[in-house]
Amino acid sequence: MRPFSFQRATDPDMALQALSAAAAANDPLTQATAQPLAGGTTLIDLMKLDVMRPAAILDINPLALSWSAIEPGAETLRLGALAKMSDVAAHDEIQRNYPVIANSLKLAASAQLRNMATLGGNVMQRTRCSYFRDVSYENCNKRNPGSGCAAMDGVNRMHAVLGTSDQCIATYPGDFAQALIALDATVEVTGKSGTRSMPFAELHKAPGNTPEIETTLQPGELISAFLISGRWPRSVYLKARDRQSYEFALSSAAVALDVQDGTIRDARVALGGVATVPWRAREAEAQLKGQKFDDGLAQRAADAAFADARGRRHNSFKIALGKRVVVRALQQAVTMEI
Amino acid sequence: MTAAAPEPKANMGQPVPRYDAVAKVTGRATYGADMPLDNPAYAFLVTSAIAKGRINSFDLDDAKRVRGVIDIVTHENAPKLKESKLFSNGGYAGTTIQPLKSAEIAHDGQIIAVVIAESYEAAREAANRVKVSYSAATPSASFDSPGTTKAAAKGQNAQFKEDPKVGDFAKAFDEAEVKVEASYETPTQHHNPMELFSTSCAWMGDTLVIYEPSQYVYGLKNGVAEQLGIDADKVRVVNPYVGGGFGSRGSMTPRTAIIAGIAKRLNRPIKLVPTRDQGFTIATYRAETRHEIKLGASRDGKLVALRHEGAEMSSRADPYCVGGTKTTTRLYACSNVDSLVSIVRADRNTPGFMRSPPEVPYLFALESAMDELAVKLNMDPVELRRVNDTTNEPIGGKPYTSRSLMACFDEAAKAFGWAQRSVAPRSMSDGDWLIGYGCAATCYPTQMAPSAARVRLQRDGRTRVEIAGHEIGTGAYTVIAQTASERLGVPLEKVSVFMGDSDLPPAPVAGGSNSTASTCSAVMMVCDQIRQRLFKAVMPNESLTDKAKETVGIGQTPANQAARSDRPLDLEKAFDALGVGVVEEYGEWKPEGAPLDSFKAMHSGHARLVGGSAMKDKIAYAFGAEFVEVRVNRFTHEIRCPRLVGAFAAGRIMNPRTARSQLMGGLIWGMSSALLEATEIDQRTARYVNDNLADYLVPVNADVPDVEVILLSEQDDHINPVGAKGLGELANVGTNAAICNAVFHATGQRIRRLPVRLENIEV
Ligand SMILES: Cc1cc2nc3c(=O)[nH]c(=O)nc-3n(C[C@H](O)[C@H](O)[C@H](O)COP(=O)(O)OP(=O)(O)OC[C@H]3O[C@@H](n4cnc5c(N)ncnc54)[C@H](O)[C@@H]3O)c2cc1C
Ligand code: SF4
């Protein structure tokens, strides 16, 4: 860890002012000299590991007053970016009408982490790629652009099979983002020049040739809220992992269905643990829409979801695993009693 | 009595609460890095990013500019240190690879520089700013890498004395009616004790005090003195508590003498707290192993031929090996046995002891193969163990001092509900989960080593026990206090125990599960010396030993204990007769069969362990049986182990509470070893990749909903005066095989490589 200045935000304007003052350098956001601090469970970790070296930390927790509300409206669910993972997971209406959200949060990290961590920080968490998190490895394109990728032919059991590039195969590790992307969430971003909204699906960027650029957020911008329209009581989050709790997904599926008279009217499928970014499996959805559900259909949807998957030495198993997870999540969603 | 404090059965002590419980839960217990130092400087290590090659140069400019940096020590300016031999070859060191000696790099994460600064933060920041230019060579990472060498263990490692064999294996195997031939593999594992590999070194004139978590304060004291070239009397090691050891702190690591040398030069105490990932490379680990097992049996299940060949990884520099064939060739009756252990060398740090070092990998192989044999014979695996149970080990024909293996199987089977098992694989399930039951034997050698103790008894009954033993979390304080209390007939609350300080009378390494047997035997002996003095004072004419025996109670049965309390010695009278207020005795105890130089070696930090299979006319082991329920998800193939039941017999159970806790921890660790723990090695660079507790998985509470420990009553009068067999390393031995056997039962698939992961399952 290196020395940094620490400032506490007093209100959104002050926060944005402070961040954009430091944002001039035009670095990618992940390397920006000023970083907002929410729960700190990713940021402080990476600072201790010397992976992130911000010169200035802006504690945005005081903004919780205006940015942490959980508001399940009739049309739209609004989740403040500073809401704690644990509060959202435990919220009655979220559990009832958005089980996929509640469970994606409940099955993430540990109770202690969920008490600290915020929704905004959660979607912005960075990959767990061991080579990325260990600065003694020089070749990591994400941390050190142009240096190569140690994971490509290294230990890559946890790495992605979807959305990869020749530059980076790091998995996007979070769970909650799969629920958001499945439900077509909107993310509200507040910057110096005001508030803008965009589909959550546009927040993260696949590595391509610039794995160091992870989101479309600009230095000086903050996520202020997530919005979800409609209700999704028939939704599940299924997560496969090495241990029963406190572990990232090897493969997960966020599934939301609208089934009427046995026909799937709408289907949402997102995949976690297997892709470089929160992953919407639109090919799988296309298979499902308008169909009557049976196991064969689930299998075709799962196959479609992984049609473009590419495994490496230790992670090829994720393709077969991911398909079975999708199949099971679909079965569970269909048979859910709501 | 509660589950945590089981009702004592015959030949068991009381489940008294832990001596150090309150200190620990209130945070009053001081660990090495908690020790206050006078104006300390802080050290931070820089470790190598390559596993093989040389350092061309350092660029220290940036680092030196960090405010508060005092010094940066590299091989160019490091204090000169003498070499120390490997622990298993008669020295003190866990590795003979001495960092900061030259520009050469022998393994990943080798210490290449030490930054000293006014604060931990400054030292860390400067360490991050050290730039190193290397000439890297291509390292060999592990078994399958080009460039490794392989040779028989015998002749390289002084502690590996024989490849046990008997009869004519080849012929018997050839003619056997039923055969099993299989290969097994175990992974690299790291201890990851909670307390990091810290050390603090403070000089007072020419005397050095070291505060460091150690499982062997006398070994560390003598080893560091040897490296610094000073008299051992000038070194004192202090650590009243150790935050987990598991073998990682049994031998000296290079860090201590380095820090001591720098502290001397700077004339200032230095505190080093390395990081979690540095712990993977500056200390030892459990090396990966490979096994070839051949079993031949008759149709009725009797073993007629057994061969165990093991290969173990070590460093280029050191021939470390665990050689578990000494156990696996002797566990079951079999007249034709053959074995061979080899050491494979690669560009790695030197491995070392990790909880049940030989038994964990070697019994995984044997107990898996036994299950495979049971399947081939269509026989209940419990019955297979029964037909091959024996009172004498097959290699030398020596009798087991006691052996309750089948009693353990029967008790554990009953508690587990083994009879409800549907025998065919894949025949049990619950919703999405396939269910499998599995079992395996567990065992661990009973070992003892010479130990000294000093005991002081006051007129008011207050008792002080001094012994340089180690509280590594096992309950050592507690059972030593109990021993003194029982032996002297004073209330437990009046006994205080002082340990973890090399200024106290020497005790052996807290390893090989010898501590309770050794330290309690010594304490018992010294307590008897006190009783005898007191008795002599009040009854000068009586036969001393007889009276002491009767009144203090040498015997261990409850009847004798009752007799003892009937006739307590009147301390007031005895002290009046002696004309003093305090009696103090010092004594040195050694186990039967200990070598002649035992006491001398004890003082110079060499523990002469005896016992297990190495005794002249007998063999002593603790035994147990473990049963597990495994669940494998049909869809995700996730593997969970919701239920573990173990029954164990280990001679006298000094304290059922602390014993249960050890065994429960062992079962959980065994499960962890079977399903989770593995250090991943980058095969190109020979570097550890998942060197942190987020990626090196150990179980969380949700993984262990139900663990049951059954303590069997067992009396063994042929091992040591307290009659106790070590049990700290007993429980984590059998679990690996039990789980793989259960995975087979659940899925029909035999996994021969640990850990079992979901990608290995094809349902
Ligand atoms: C051991 C461990 C296990 C874990 N397991 C899981 C798991 O199973 N599943 C899972 O999903 N997660 C897991 N996590 C990750 C955890 O959920 C995240 O660390 C957490 O959600 C991050 O939230 P935070 O508020 O602490 O973020 P911080 O650490 O404060 O911030 C993270 C990043 O986001 C930026 N940031 C924070 N808030 C905002 C905002 N409002 N707008 C823009 N940028 C912002 C910060 O500058 C920083 O760069 C695990 C973490 C650990 C340490
Ligand atoms: S996968 Fe990405 S993050 Fe990991 S080493 Fe390669 S470039 Fe770096």
Image: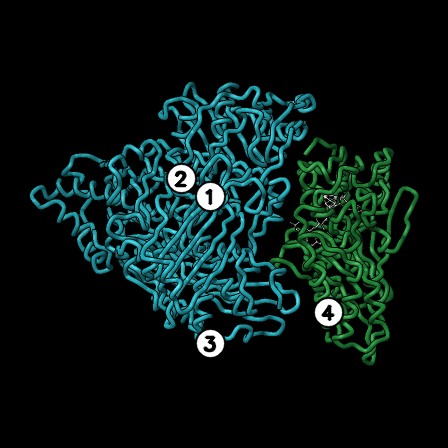
Chain colours: A green, B cyan
Tell me where residue B733 sits by quadrant. Answer: bottom left
Q: Do the residues under discs 1 and 2 have CB atoms within 8 angstroms?
A: yes
For the residues carrying marks 2 and 3, which lies nearer the camera in this image? 2
Badge number at residue B583: none
Under tag 1, what secondary structure?
strand
For the residues carrying marks 1 and 4, which lies nearer the camera in this image? 1
Pinpoint residue B126: horizontal percent, then vertical percent. Answer: 65, 27
Under tag 4, what secondary structure?
helix
Q: Residue furthest left?
A: B541
Badge number at residue B157: 2
Pinpoint residue B213: horizontal percent, then vertical percent. Answer: 46, 37
Pinpoint residue B572: horizontal percent, then vertical percent. Answer: 19, 42
Callout 3: residue from which chain? B
Q: State the residue position of label 3.
A: B420
Q: Amino acid at mark 3?
A: Gln
Q: Amino acid at mark 2?
A: Asn
Q: State the residue position of label 4.
A: A327
On screen, residue B618 versus residue B147, left or right, reads left
For the residues carrying marks 2 and 4, which lies nearer the camera in this image? 2
Q: Is residue B661 visible?
A: no
Looking at the picture, does residue A118 appear above or below residue A307?
Answer: above
Callout 4: residue from which chain? A
Q: Do the residues under discs 3 and 4 have CB atoms within 8 angstroms?
A: no
Crowding at dot 4, Cα within 10 Å, few <14 / some 14-19 / many 20+, comes out as many
Q: State the residue position of label 1.
A: B343
On screen, residue B554 versus residue A220, left or right, reads left
